[in-house]
């Protein structure tokens, strides 16, 4: 999750011969949200969120609005929940498609026209969801499904049509250029919400920068969601498998919207809110990049006295997080392709994250 006012993620990989010895991550600078929000009425901040968060803006707005309502003890209707869930899913579909095209089909001239038409239809779908059209127009989802099929995206298992540009991309990513060491995986889910929210509203200022849940830093995002559903083998975590997970999720989200976007069939705890006592509330939203948290405290006048936000980037790109664990100790089977292989691994966690990749050679003592 990139912030409009932030900077790039710095990833420095140290190589000892053909092995990745260390991986250092310098995260983007966090904006002073708590200071920016404190003392202001919630209504004045809702429309400012898209200017602060360049990606997943709708998810941030839903999280913020839901947390404020929970702090006020305001119940929301089923129709409002339906609208917000549909809005988050539509944005999630658009963001996943954008990441797919940017990272994997940007140089494929043969697909350019189909991609442009598809993204126009997706933009219209997002606009319908924003306007409160629930369910979204059936003709829009039908056109999107047909366009995905034309691009070779129709298999719920994440395997694109044989010979399609995405199938060729998966085959290229499957080449054993980078051999990772076996590792234990941990995944963020709705079951962690209460623990995380309690930490966010504690007096420990380190929580937002050191999100260890006692089992290591968990991963969040499309691949983690597929793993939690038991659809993938834990031994397969290479970029090709993560790309398949994104494709599978795109197909599933499109099918959910096409089937009427019924809230009772939504998965992953897409939009949850939690009342935490007088004037305290929080929300968790499953957005394109993973699970997003907002937590607030209000003063007696109803203005914000405290605001905390925890984004998916802070898990996946943590200094001891899943990306670091995936790269550390990996062996480069083809040194000339090292940079491309490592870049592909980083992009498999978030193809839209802005990062700079640095290399450093180290010698054994």
Image (spheres, rainbow, N blue to C red):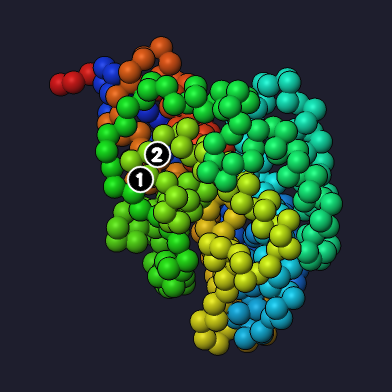
Please say whether residue 39 is visible from this viewpoint: no
- Estimate how packed mark 2 is, as few (under 14), some (14 to 19) or many (20 or more) residues with alpha carbons within 10 Å: many
Secondary-structure class at tag 1: loop
Could you tell me which residue is drawn at 33 percent across and 18 percent down? Answer: 333
| Residue 308 picture location, percent across and down | 54, 65
* Residue toward you, 129 or 254: 254
Image quarter where the C terminus lies is top left
Quarter of the view holding residue 40: bottom right
Q: Is residue 320 above or below residue 283?
A: above
Q: Which residue is mark 2?
A: 237
Q: Is residue 222 above or below residue 188?
A: above
| Residue 15 picture location, percent across and down | 31, 22
* Residue toward you, 297 or 248: 248
Could you tell me which residue is drawn at 52 percent across and 48 percent down? Answer: 222
Q: Which residue is mark 1?
A: 234
| Residue 95 picture location, percent across and down | 66, 45
Could you tell me which residue is drawn at 65 percent across and 78 percent down? Answer: 69
- Estimate how packed mark 1 is, as few (under 14), some (14 to 19) or many (20 or more) residues with alpha carbons within 10 Å: few
* Residue toward you, 33 or 155: 155
Q: Are marks 1 and 2 in contact (CB under 8 Å)?
A: yes
Secondary-structure class at tag 2: loop
Could you tell me which residue is drawn at 79 percent across and 59 percent down? Answer: 136
Quarter of the view holding residue 57: bottom right
Position of 152 with respect to 124 (left or right) is left
């Amino acid at each position: 999750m990139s912030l409009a006012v932030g900077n790039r993620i710095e990833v420095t990989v140290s190589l000892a011969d053909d092995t990745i010895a260390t991986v250092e991550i310098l995260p983007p600078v966090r904006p002073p949200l708590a200071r920016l929000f404190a003392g202001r009425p919630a209504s004045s901040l809702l429309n400012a969120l898209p200017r602060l968060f360049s990606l997943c803006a709708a998810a941030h707005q839903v999280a913020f609005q839901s947390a404020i309502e929970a702090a006020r003890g305001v119940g929301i209707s089923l129709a409002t929940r339906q609208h917000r869930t549909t809005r988050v899913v539509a944005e999630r579909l658009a963001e996943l498609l954008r990441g797919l095209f940017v990272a994997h089909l940007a140089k494929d001239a043969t697909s350019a026209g189909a991609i442009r038409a598809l993204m126009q239809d997706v933009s219209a779908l997002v606009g319908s969801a924003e306007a409160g059209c629930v369910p979204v127009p059936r003709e829009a989802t039908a056109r999107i499904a047909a366009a995905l099929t034309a691009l070779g995206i129709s298999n719920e298992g994440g395997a694109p049509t044989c010979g399609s540009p995405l199938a060729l991309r998966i085959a290229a990513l499957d080449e054993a250029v980078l051999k990772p060491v076996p590792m234990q995986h941990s995944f963020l889910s709705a079951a962690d919400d209460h623990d995380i929210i309690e930490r966010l509203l504690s007096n420990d200022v380190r929580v937002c920068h050191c999100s260890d849940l006692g089992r290591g830093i968990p991963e969040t995002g499309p691949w983690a969601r597929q793993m939690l559903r038991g659809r993938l083998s834990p031994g397969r975590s290479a970029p090709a498998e993560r790309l398949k997970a994104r494709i599978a999720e795109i197909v599933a989200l499109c099918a959910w919207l096409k089937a009427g976007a019924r809230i009772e069939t939504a998965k992953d705890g897409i939009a949850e809110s939690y009342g935490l006592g007088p004037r305290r509330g929080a929300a968790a939203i499953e957005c394109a990049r993973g699970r997003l948290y907002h937590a607030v405290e209000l003063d007696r006048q109803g203005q914000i006295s405290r605001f905390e936000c925890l984004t998916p980037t802070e898990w996946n790109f943590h200094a001891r997080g899943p990306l670091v664990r995936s790269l550390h100790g990996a062996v480069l089977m083809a040194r000339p392709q090292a940079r491309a292989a490592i870049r592909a691994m980083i992009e498999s966690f978030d193809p839209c994250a802005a990062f700079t990749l640095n290399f450093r050679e180290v010698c054994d003592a």
